[in-house]
Image: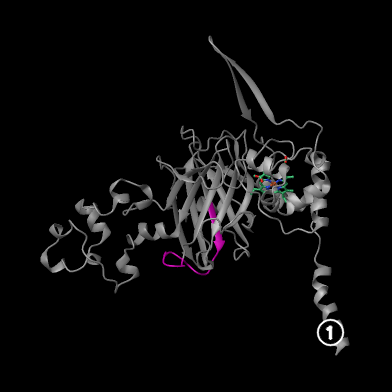
Amino acid sequence: MKKIIIFSIALMSLPALTLAQKSGDQIFKSVCSACHTIGKGKLVGPDLNGVHAKYPESWLISFIRSSQTMVKKGDAKAVKIFNEYNKIPMPDNNLTDAEIKNVINYIKQNSTVKTTTTVTTETKTETKTETVKETKVAPWTPSDISITSKKVATELNARDLDNSMWQTVSATNIPLAAQNIVYPNLHETSLAQMSVKSVYNGNKVAIWMEWNDTSKDVFVEVDQFSDQVAIQLPVDVNNIPSYMMGNAGGYVHIIHWKAVWQEDCENGFRDVKDAYPNATVDIYPGQESQLDRSRKLQSINIRAEEMVEKGTTFNMPGTASGNFMSKIKRQQPVEEASAVGFGTLTSMEDQTATGWARHQNGKWTVCIIFDVNSGNKYKAAMKDKTKIAFAVWDGNKENIGGRKHYAQWADLILEK
Ligand code: HEC
């Protein structure tokens, strides 16, 4: 019996022994670089240039593993840096001591002596001298993946998914990762990669995306979500912010396609009545006068589209006030939004991007078109190149919000 137990313990510990230890380079690029640079300015978190010399190694190991544990214990240094960064918690890392040492070593190797990241500029006025502190963010550095946008001379139309020009453009393969850096997170990927093509015609850029997803999820109900894809562009190509929704002072422009909106565009707004045919809802006050006698029984018999047509949206404040998110009659399945760090995503007033999609043979094909330079200071503007990042949601795997697949910044080069 003893022998058997010992034998099975040895077996159980085998997988742990064979698990490959991650290198500092791998860990930094896949986890830390969402929020930190080494010597290129701050992103979500501080510039880590020279941080190996700022603290003892044992402190760094504990902090990198779980900074919040240290903050909660009242560690003075951890509390100080946490407060300096507006109490944005750095997520815990499930790394071994050896792996954390690898990443500290990587930071050390890539650090320069220069440790300052704050630029101070003086502005003289007649009456007083004002000191303006600006924080530098990371400038352009080439990414591992590059997408070339082919120059075409035609008008671009997102609905023209079968346009023969797409056959002449080569696709770039974009590997997708599970977003498990911040909560709510995704543990496992269900989508491995997507295929991306791009063309531009001087004024507009088109991004064509295709990925395998056998379940077409276009409805939103309790615990059931819609398939989605979003592209993200830096607003200023000279200041590349964190690929995770930007960072303080580093805006990103997001264009987000939603299968549920595509369905609205193609088949009309999906009402509560469509999702729950047997539901009963009382008539809202004020609605009686809008109805003939036969329909006075239940509010559910009144379709939102009809209320919009009759101009009786007084019980739908979002729609009545023109909130883009509450739109009933949609022409576009995409939303343009702006973000400047986690939790700051905001729908834009100026919605000019267009999109269209198709689900066929177990694949989504989505095209999104936007301006090379719209003149809106919160939207991406580019001359010859920019960065682009992607997020994809698999609706039937409960992907929603931050629980998504993502790809870090890739270069988007406009062909000469
Ligand atoms: C989601 C964003 C995020 C990720 C990912 C992240 N950090 Fe941080 N990090 C922060 C923030 C924000 C701070 C500032 C302290 C705080 O708010 O707790 C910080 C602080 C630090 C500090 C202290 C810096 C100083 O100057 O005192 C170190 C060291 C550090 N992080 C290392 C890492 C390493 C190594 C990784 C990757 C394994 C990593 N961080 C991943 C956001 C992040």
Who's the residue at 54% across and 12% down the image? 125
- Residue 37, located in which quarter of the rendered image? top right
Mark 1: is the Cβ under 8 angstroms from ligand 1? no
Residue corresponding to mark 1: 5
- The residue at 76%/58% (across/down) is 95
Considering every residue shown, the one lying at the far top of the view is: 126
Q: Secondary structure of the magenta portion, mostly?
A: loop
Position of residue 100 relative to residue 223, above or below, is: above
Residue at image point 56% right, 13% down: 128
The type of residue carrying mark 1 is: Ile
Q: Is there any visible trace of residue 298 in the rendered image?
A: yes
Query: In this orientation, does residue 163 appear?
Result: no
Q: Which residue is found at the position 57% from the left and 33% from the top?
A: 383
Given residues 167 and 183, the one toward you in this image is 183
Q: Tag 1: Cα neighbours inside 10 Å, few (<14), some, or many (≥20)?
A: few
Q: Position of residue 97 (x, y in %)?
A: 81, 56
Q: Nearer the viewer, residue 164 or 19?
A: 19
Q: Position of residue 338 (x, y in %)?
A: 49, 42
Q: Residue furthest bottom?
A: 1
Which span of residues is magenta-colored?
Answer: 208-224
Does 218 lie within the magenta span? yes
Relative placement, left or right, of 215 versus 176 is left
Q: Is 178 contained in the magenta span? A: no
Q: Residue furthest left?
A: 293
Q: Position of residue 334 (x, y in %)?
A: 44, 50
